[in-house]
Amino acid sequence: MNYGRFDSAAHEYVVTRPDTPRAWSNYLGSRRYGGIVTNNAGGYSFTRSPAEGRILRHRYNSVPAEQPGRVFYLRDRDSADYWSSAWQPVAKPLDRYRTETRFGPGYADITSDYAGIKTESLYFIPLNQEFEYWRLRVTNTGTKPRRLSVFACAEFTTEWNLLNDLLNLQYTQYIGEAAWRDGFIRASSCSRLPEDKANFANRDQSRWWWMTLVGGDIAGHDCDRDSFLGSYRSYDRPLAVERGTCGNSAGFSDNTCGVIQSDIELAPGETREVLVLLGIGKSEREGRATRRKFGTAAACEKEFTALKAHWHALLETLHVETPDADFDHMTNTWGAYNALVTLEWSRSCSLVYTGEHRDGFGFRDTVQDMLGVVAMVPDIVRERLVLMLSGQDASGGAQPDVRPWLHVPGQMKPTPPGNYRSDDCLWFFNTIPAYVAETGDSAFYDEVVPFADKGKATVLGHLRRALEFNLARTGRNGLPCGLLADWNDCLKLGYKGESVFVAFQVRLGLATYAEIAGAKKLTRERSWALAELKKIDRAITRTCWDGKWFIWAIAEDGTVYGSAKAKEGRIYLNTQCWAILSGYADTNQAKSALASVKKLLASDYGVAMCAPPFAKTPVKVMRAVLFNPGNKENAGIFSHTQSWAVLAEIMAGDGDQAYDYYRSFMPSAQNDQIEKREIEPFAHCQSTHSQFSKKFGMSRVPWLSGTASWAHYTATNHILGLRPETGGLRIDPCIPSTWPGFKARRLFRGREVHVEVRNPNELNRGVSHLLVDGERIEGNLLPLSALNAVTRVIAVIGN
Ligand code: GLC
């Protein structure tokens, strides 16, 4: 069963049934002013930080899930019937109420038909602005004139700090005000305190926001939420809407809101458009200036066109046509967009993430989040890399997260030794070379960046320090310690416990470092890295092979995890994949480890993280035991890791198996059986219930996950095999043997490359030469010297 379809030409997903199994959402705006919008116009808004700058309120995990939101109520003044321009919150019966939501990058556009009235409500935040647009178009599709009232409605927070607003009610129910003044709703928190805009973190200041409506006569307003709703009522039947008139209430303490009523009359066939603008600042200052500049239909349309053009230009970086339309939907639009959304928002805002605890940029997540977007936003990646490098301590370990508004490089307190994670800085070895390969900016390695606490080093120096950090913290088997955690948050091995995953990461780091040093002719650096690599290989060889697969970890007390002898967590996906990704595993080991993964972990919805699930293992070591079996780190299908399985299969040469794994967690592939997945078919998610769960196949925590970046990177650079290198673009696809080929258009170093891959012999990989604008080039590297403004390349697999 499906609830919608992809419209690839428009870069949109069209939700055709509003009663989706869970609320589906999309992202608006940027960190300057951002928001979430659901397929039923639920959601919230904030500025700078979802935890500290919350403007529109959202009650997490409430029933129904998406209320309050940005509501347009419509009421027929003759029949007294009323409904909403999105199906929720009034929820008219679906046999009489027809609706569709178009989600595109940065907007939601909801059309509905009910009782002879068609509405279109469009929600977006214009580029680089601090306000949101709600545009409502109302059309009389009947044959009689209609007299309607429109009520635009938002629930405000009282304090911009999320938790205070929702929980510290003995304080925050006495600080909000909202009132109608000169055509605006003027809302505030602690209005008697001075503003301190330069110091966002200062909670003892007044904050201001505003809302206005243009394009219709104003018939009334409400600024006190409970006057508008009436007691013991909810958003499905507000008293004021039922009655047909707002009470013109002022908001003073308790809960404030913004409701603006406009009465309109429509001749048959006539369309009227009203605009709501809602933003931060004082109504008489920012509000007025914004309305003057943006408060017309033409300005709104212009901003919407600019927003789409902005996103479409980013998505133009790569366009593919493959035999698998689901793959194309992800690669051309949703996978790319998901990776960009994750880059912007890290793990701070969704219907699940609140911003609390996880505001700012979590270190390891953010460094990985860049991998999938380097081609689209290289400049932002460079800036973010510098920010994250400045979050590395002089010790070589990292601050757990970087909050740009609090982060002062060189002056941060070093992370307490017991709080270091073992993997944080090792992710630079994936992302930095990818950035340099995309841009050719090898001078980046020489750029000097401060450490978080003290001192500074070149980027290469930061990389060395990262390796030294792990090399200096090894356990009794000579493997790197897991410290507070490695990639797996649930792994608590004790300070001296050893992580095999990190051993492979360090191995990859050393090999990469040697390569960079080699290219820079730093012979001693190269030799150092190669010598360390030999040492770590010896340690791995001594302890990490279990017979059929690689072990998981060795706890401080010597307990081995991930061994055939164990009862729980006998096999762990990550170490099988990373043994291969790091180049450690020999052919036989790779074969055997991957066969074990397939046999013991793989399922129709992805590969479980480990098996069997934990039930008795002490929680002190393996916190995964907290979770129900088959969930998250306790043998769930952790989406983030899926691409590693795909990459491992690609490196081992099995393109068919790789693609099977890729499709099994690809959201778009589940569009027509979405009742199983339940969440968005166009966004990745954190995890799926595995074969060990009672809810096998159900996915949870959509959008913000390391999955997005890794999946897009894997699809583009390794399945399609369009892989930038400093010297050119490698064309090394590893596709299903059933694909006759594919076409791609890739922007690379400011040029356009058109690639046609042909696969006449039904193989997976193996391009031995290229035809570049008709000329034969041996090997599969399209060299920079062969790049023209537009270059056409034909690559035949198996020739
Ligand atoms: C979550 C965290 C990530 C961690 C992973 C595995 O996705 O955001 O940092 O690596 O869980 O525990």
Image (cartoon, rainbow, N blue to C red):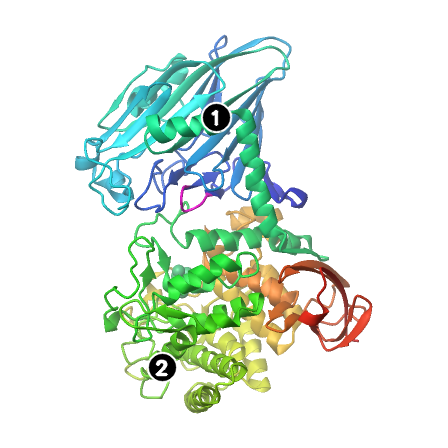
Q: Position of residue 293 (x, y in %)?
A: 47, 29
> For residue 363, which quarter of the picture?
bottom left
Of callouts 2 and 1, which one flags the residue occurring earlier in the amino acid sequence? Answer: 1
Q: Residue at x 34, y 55 (%)?
A: 404
Q: Position of residue 725 (x, y in %)?
A: 60, 72
Q: Residue at x 23, y 28 (%)?
A: 254
Question: For numbered disc 1, what is the local secondary structure?
Answer: loop
Q: Nearer the viewer, residue 308 or 595?
A: 308
Q: Which residues are magenta?
A: 29-33
> For residue 634, which quarter of the picture?
bottom left
Real-space Cα separation, disc 2 to disc 1, in angstroms: 57 Å
| Disc 2 residue type (three-letter) | Glu
Ligand 1 visible in quadrant:
bottom left
Question: For numbered disc 2, what is the local secondary structure?
Answer: helix
| Disc 1 residue type (three-letter) | Gly
**Picture quarter with the N terminus:** top right
Numbered mark located on residue 295 in the image: 1
Q: Quick check: 651 left or right of 75?
A: right
Badge 1 density bin: few <14, some 14–19, many ≥20, Cα 10 Å: many
Which residue is labeled 2 in the image?
Answer: 468
> For residue 279, which quarter of the picture?
top left
* Residue 568 in sight: no
Q: Position of residue 430 (x, y in %)?
A: 49, 71
Answer whether labels 2 and 1 touch (C-beta < 8 Å).
Answer: no
Please state which of the two labelled residues, at mark 2 or mark 1, is closer to the viewer: 1
Numbered mark located on residue 442 in the image: none
Q: Nearer the viewer, residue 483 or 17?
A: 483
**Picture quarter with the C terminus:** bottom right
Badge 2 density bin: few <14, some 14–19, many ≥20, Cα 10 Å: some
Residue 30 among those drawn in magenta: yes
Residue 160, compared with residue 713, is above or below; it is: above
